[in-house]
Amino acid sequence: MTKESGLQWLRELLWWTITFILAMLVLLPIYGTIGNDYLKMNLLMIVTAITYFRFIIYLNYVPYLHHLYTRVVLIVVAAVGFWQFIRKMQDFMYVVDNYTISTFLSPDKMFVDGDAVQRSFLYFKQEYLLFNISVLILTIVLVLRTISSLWKLGKTL
C-alpha cells in the first residue's frame, strides 16, 4: 500500500466517523422518545444522505469507487434503494396520518402526554421527511453523476 493510498483510506475512515457522529447528533433530541424501529430507519436515511452527498462531490476521491464495476454496482444499489426509500416514506406518511403519536413512542414514553413529547414528535416527523426527501433527490443526482463519470471513463478507454 502506497502512502497516497493509505491517506485515501484514512480520509475515508475519517469521513465515515464524521458521518456517524453527525447522524447521532441529529438523532440525539429524539433518542429515548421515539421507538427503535423508526430510529433505525431514520439513522439509515441520515447516513445514506450524507454518504450520497459526499459521493456526489468527491466521487473520484473515494478509494473503493475507482473501478468501473463498483460504480455500476453503486448505480444499481442506489436505484433499488430509491424505490425502497419511496416505499418507506409512503408507509411513514400513512402511519402519521392514520395513527396516534403513541405508535412512534418507545414503550417507556407510551403513557406520557406532554409538550416535550409533542415537540419531540414534531422534530422527528420533520427530520424524517427532510432526510427521506434528501435521499431521494441525492439518489437521482448521484446516479446521473455516476453515469456521467462512466461516460467520461468510457471515452478515455
Image (cartoon, rainbow, N blue to C red):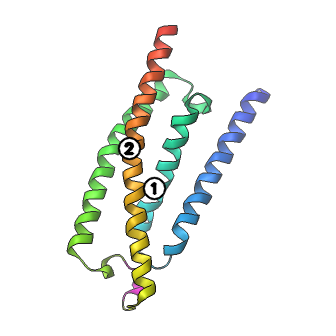
Q: Residue visible at 37% across and 33% down? A: 76
Q: Residues within 10 Å of mark 2 (few under 14, many from 20)?
A: some
Q: Which image quadrant for residue 96?
A: bottom left
Q: In x, y percent, where is residue 133?
A: 37, 52
Q: In x, y percent, where is residue 83?
A: 29, 45
Q: Which image quadrant for residue 98?
A: bottom left
Mark 2 element type: helix
- Residue furthest toward the left? 98
Residue 108, visible in the rendered structure:
no
Mark 1 element type: helix
In the rendered image, the quadrant that contains the N terminus is top right
Q: Is residue 89 left or right of residue 138?
A: left
Q: Is residue 97 left or right of residue 23?
A: left
Q: Residue visible at 39% across and 76% down? A: 121
Residue 108 colored magenta?
A: yes
In the rendered structure, find residue 44 and report the number of the disc placed on it: 1
Q: Is residue 4 placed above or below 48 in the rendered structure?
A: above
Nearest-to-viewer mark from 1 and 2 = 2
Residue 16, visible in the rendered structure:
yes
Residue 12 colored magenta?
A: no
Q: Is residue 108 left or right of residue 27?
A: left
Q: Please count the marks in the image.
A: 2
Q: In x, y percent, where is residue 129?
A: 37, 60
Q: Which amino acid does the dot numbered 1 rest on?
A: Leu
Q: Which residues are magenta?
A: 105-110
Identify residue for label 2: 137
Q: Which amino acid does the dot numbered 2 rest on?
A: Ile
Q: Nearer the viewer, residue 33 or 68?
A: 33
Q: Is residue 31 placed above or below 131 in the rendered structure?
A: below
